[in-house]
Image (cartoon, rainbow, N blue to C red):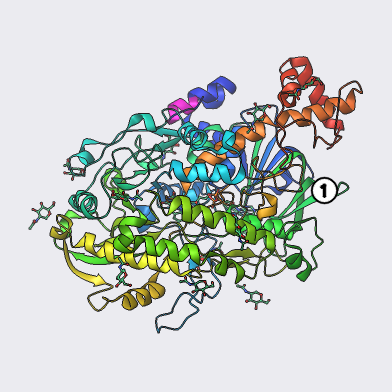
């Protein structure tokens, strides 16, 4: 059950669990509401928690929130960034994502890629490094992102499920339900529907989840004109893009809370309403530097504690873990933390003299990113576009861009479609043989490439997104690569956790990515020249009339393209022999109790903005964690009462469904949890827990 909105409701909820006097005043309520959030290392140092969540970002706060619904479980979150409470107004203004941006501030990790041979600098020389912002604050990138809430397709989700052989957990039906579980949807305002063709199917949305999904309070004539133009020449208008058929043209939803026209994100949705919980502690401003393991069973190591520090050279603190460590540090930081902790490719770990805990070559590999840039025009009538500023008027400031069009491969390449697909297919062996990567990772690439070629590129799913944007006083039609064939990596560059890792997305390592964008930008320009959008644009300022031939476009792309901020897949859920890092239950191979839950686990990039899938997978991840909580109780009971049948000691073969890839399902795994529903059993387990360590 979730509190939808409002201080009054929050106070009412608090009244149920707190003494009435504590909630007499709103300020008081607010203070209590943040009670879980601390900057004191001593609140964790030397203590034990059932679950330690690394990273209080989009996924981490969902996982912590869901686990701490069970008041018997003690949950700690460690977030490298600050809380953001002092800068609430900046983070929560939708228009602020462009005009009062938290990027390039203390809320941004400010990463940059390594030198990219596929990118050109302004003078045309290869090796340009591209900026890679990431949120460093409670809520993570969901606190600083562009708010687009766009779902991926059934085709892609079912492909994921079949890559890991687990439709029972990862099919579209499960993901769709999980995304709806996280969502409260509100239909569009008349102000918007008067100007733009917006359709929706309420059945495709959630009604009482923590995250608000809706549209802004206002819109503008060029937005409607884009939808009409793109529907004619890019991809047909889609009345229901959110239920698995994610292609076509539509005005996408945004993570906006229409009760006060603010950004809804994982902190406001999953933490603020529940941070009165006494079993939840969220430590901000501390960076996790290492996970420590008990390696006495080398084939099934046990995470025992987590180390953290406030700054480079600062004191290191330790928190102990009774049940599980959950990595939610995001696509870049998870591989870094794993490698620093001894889980990764042995050759890399040896290079830095890091003792190998698990030789797992896939850690940090499979990196896939979306790339985007925009064709830009001056506007004919400057008074009909959104102000290029935060104005202080909440209705006006609720506007941010979200009109999109997902274009399929056959439209993009028209007459050349089958030739393009055949070229990629016929060159696959050649491509794989030319890669200098561990064999297991190569097997994984082979698997995911085959999925892309056979199931994605020949389907209705768009390898290209076209986006409409009013930015800084001009109009853009952007193009963005959605299904890169290029695969990159994240690797540590030193043993210092405060040194940035090497981020190598290997942009344009596969030529097909450049071809998709080249045809995409040609189409983007044509959309701008298509009525009725052409009635709203004046001269093209980028790239301008000098760019016409394929060669012109390719050079311009290499010089101007940048991340669309959607890196994923660096802890891919794939079979271990295919360079996988986590199994179908999100457990890191070779470990008993270390899970990864965030954007790093999908095995394939999806044609959508990334956060909707992360909201869904984090909900599923939390369910898996809770379904498996019984194994730890059972272990405790069996060690305190010799009569309990324990088949496998540390619980690795106790019939639970998180057994490192073998995954025999058994109804018996939750018997301990069921027994625990009696208060006496809870007390017994709690007492046993105090004296028993896994
Ligand atoms: C500028 C930008 C714009 C975007 N726009 C959109 C959009 O419009 N729509 C959309 O759907 N998606 C968008 N995205 C992508 C989306 O926000 C991310 O895919 C999503 O937030 C990923 O969730 P996550 O939980 O994996 O990581 P994050 O949300 O990034 O959370 C990771 C958290 O872990 C913390 N952390 C990392 N390492 C450590 C450590 N060692 N110790 C402690 N804490 C640590 C980080 O500080 C961060 O808070 C955008 C992203 C960015 C950066
Ligand atoms: C908007 O309302 C939500 C509750 O619905 C609340 O959590 C949030 O703090 C409010 N935002 C602002 C900036 O007032
Ligand atoms: C990111 O860069 C900005 C601007 O240079 C700086 O103020 C901020 O502290 C940096 N963020 C981090 C986490 O270092
Ligand atoms: C929409 O709202 C804006 C801002 O309040 C207002 O200026 C505009 O007239 C409204 N448009 C319509 C069509 O209602
Ligand atoms: C966070 O840590 C930095 C580095 O030690 C420190 O300068 C800053 O004051 C801290 N911020 C908060 C809110 O504690
Ligand atoms: C410009 O746009 C404004 C706001 O929509 C409108 O009132 C005005 O008539 C437009 N001017 C012209 C010349 O079309
Ligand atoms: C198709 O191929 C021909 C010949 O190579 C080329 O001239 C044309 O531009 C291509 N068209 C598309 C849409 O790729
Ligand atoms: C890729 O996988 C296919 C089977 O799906 C296999 O026939 C082929 O040999 C593999 N290619 C490489 C380079 O491993
Ligand atoms: C085929 O693969 C090789 C090796 O990666 C590459 O050099 C070549 O450009 C590719 N050819 C095509 C047509 O993509
Ligand atoms: C791609 O979209 C076009 C336009 O809707 C459609 O005609 C075509 O069948 C689609 N291609 C595939 C492979 O589905
Ligand atoms: C990686 O480490 C080397 C050697 O210490 C250093 O010169 C280089 O700048 C580092 N690269 C990055 C991207 O930090
Ligand atoms: C559950 O345990 C009982 C008793 O040990 C056993 O007979 C039964 O086969 C188990 N069920 C499953 C599904 O493993
Ligand atoms: C895990 O096992 C339990 C009990 O056997 C079952 O109810 C649940 O659906 C399983 N969860 C997953 C994610 O397979």
The residue furthest right is 642
Q: What stretch is highlighted in magenta?
A: 5-11
Which residue appears at 72% of the width and 65% of the height? 313
Q: Where is residue 44 in the image (x, y as percent from the top left)?
A: 73, 44
Spot occupied by residue 229 in the image (x, y as percentages of width and height): 20, 53
Q: Quadrant of residue 650?
A: top right
Q: In this view, does 518 lie above or below 144?
A: below
**Where does residue 677 sit, x and y in percent of width and height?**
71, 17
Residue 179 in sight here: yes
Principal SS element in the magenta part? helix
Residue in front for this viewpoint, 594 or 104: 594
Mark 1 residue element: loop
In the image, what residue occupies the spot 24% across and 44% down?
Answer: 218
Horizontal side, residue 236 vs residue 367: left or right:
left
Q: In this view, does 193 lie to the left or right of 10?
A: left
Asked whether 526 falls inside the magenta stretch, the response is no
- Picture quarter with ligand 5: bottom right
Q: Is mark 1 within 8 Å of ligand 13?
A: no
Q: How crowded is mark 1: few (under 14 residues within 10 Å), some or many (20 or more)?
A: few
- Asked whether 229 or 278 is in front, the reply is 229
Q: Which of 69 and 152 is in front in this view?
A: 152
Image quarter where the C terminus lies is top right
Relative to 408, 612 lies left or right: right
| Residue identified by numbered label 1 | 299
Describe residue 541's horizontal placement relative to residue 266 as left or right: left
Q: Is residue 606 visible?
A: no
Q: How many labels does the image show?
A: 1
Residue located 52% across and 59% down the image:
368
**430 up-or-down from 217: above or below:** below
Camera-nearest residue between 411 and 60: 411
- Give percent across and percent down for residue 648: 85, 34
């Amino acid at each position: 059950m979730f509190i939808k909105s409002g201080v009054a409701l929050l106070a009412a909820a608090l009244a149920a669990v707190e003494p009435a006097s504590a909630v007499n005043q709103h300020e008081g309520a607010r203070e209590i509401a943040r009670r879980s959030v601390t900057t004191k290392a001593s609140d964790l140092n030397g203590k034990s928690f059932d679950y330690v969540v690394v990273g209080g970002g989009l996924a981490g706060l969902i996982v912590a929130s869901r686990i701490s619904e069970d008041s018997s479980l003690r949950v700690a979150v460690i977030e490298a960034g600050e809380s953001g409470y002092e800068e609430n107004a900046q983070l929560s203004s939708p228009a602020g994502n462009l005009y009062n941006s938290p990027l390039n501030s203390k809320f941004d990790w400010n990463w940059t890629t390594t030198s990219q041979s596929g990118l050109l600098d302004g003078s045309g020389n290869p090796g340009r490094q591209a900026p890679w912002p990431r949120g460093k604050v409670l809520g993570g990138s969901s606190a600083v992102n562009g708010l687009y809430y766009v779902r991926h397709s059934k085709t892609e989700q079912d492909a994921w499920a079949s890559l890991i052989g687990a439709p029972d957990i990862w099919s579209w039906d499960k993901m769709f339900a999980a995304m709806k579980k996280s969502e409260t949807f509100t239909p569009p305002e008349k102000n918007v529907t008067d100007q733009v063709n917006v359709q929706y199917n309420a059945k495709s949305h959630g009604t009482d989840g923590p995250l608000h999904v809706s549209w802004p309070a206002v819109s503008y004539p060029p937005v409607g004109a884009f939808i009409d133009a793109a529907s004619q020449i890019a991809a047909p208008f889609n009345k229901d893009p959110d239920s698995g058929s994610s292609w076509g043209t539509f005005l996408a939803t945004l993570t906006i809370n229409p009760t006060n026209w603010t950004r809804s994100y994982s902190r406001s949705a999953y933490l603020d309403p529940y941070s009165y919980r006494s079993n939840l502690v969220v430590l901000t401003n501390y960076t996790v530097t290492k996970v420590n393991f008990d390696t006495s069973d080398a084939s099934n190591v046990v995470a025992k504690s987590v180390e953290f520090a406030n700054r480079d050279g600062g004191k290191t603190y330790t928190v102990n873990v009774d049940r599980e460590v959950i990595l939610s540090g995001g696509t870049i930081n998870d591989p870094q933390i794993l490698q620093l902790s001894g889980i990764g490719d042995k050759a890399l770990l040896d290079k830095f003299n890091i003792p190998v805990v698990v030789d797992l070559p896939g850690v940090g590999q499979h990196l896939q990113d979306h790339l985007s840039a925009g064709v830009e025009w001056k506007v004919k009538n400057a008074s009909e576009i959104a102000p290029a500023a935060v104005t202080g008027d909440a209705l006006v400031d609720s506007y941010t861009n979200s009109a999109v069009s997902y274009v399929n491969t056959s439209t993009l390449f028209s007459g050349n479609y089958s030739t393009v697909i055949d070229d990629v297919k016929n060159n696959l062996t050649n491509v794989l043989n030319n890669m200098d990567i561990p064999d297991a990772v190569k097997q994984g690439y082979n698997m995911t490439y085959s999925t892309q070629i056979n199931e994605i590129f020949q389907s209705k799913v768009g390898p290209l997104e076209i986006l409409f944007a009013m930015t800084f006083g001009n109009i853009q039609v952007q193009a963005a690569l959605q299904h890169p064939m290029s695969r990159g990596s994240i690797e540590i560059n030193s043993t210092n956790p405060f040194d940035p890792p090497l981020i190598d997305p290997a942009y344009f390592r596969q030529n097909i990515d450049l071809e998709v964008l080249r045809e995409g930008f040609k189409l983007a320009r044509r959309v701008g020249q298509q009525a009725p959008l052409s009635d709203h644009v004046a001269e093209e300022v980028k790239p301008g009339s000098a760019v016409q031939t394929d060669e012109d476009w390719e050079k311009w792309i290499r010089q101007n393209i940048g991340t669309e901020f959607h890196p994923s897949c660096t802890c891919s859920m794939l079979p271990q022999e295919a360079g996988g890092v986590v199994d179908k239950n999100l457990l890191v191979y070779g470990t008993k109790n270390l899970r990864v839950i965030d954007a790093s686990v999908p095995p394939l990039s999806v044609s959508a903005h990334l956060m909707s899938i992360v909201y869904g997978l984090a909900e599923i991840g939390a369910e898996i964690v809770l379904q498996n909580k019984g194994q730890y109780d059972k272990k405790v009971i069996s060690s305190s009462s010799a009569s309990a049948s324990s088949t496998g000691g540390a619980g690795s073969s106790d019939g639970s469904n998180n057994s490192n890839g073998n995954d025999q399902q058994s109804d018996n795994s939750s018997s301990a949890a069921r027994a625990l529903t009696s208060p006496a059993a809870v007390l017994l387990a709690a007492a046993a827990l105090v004296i028993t360590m896994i």
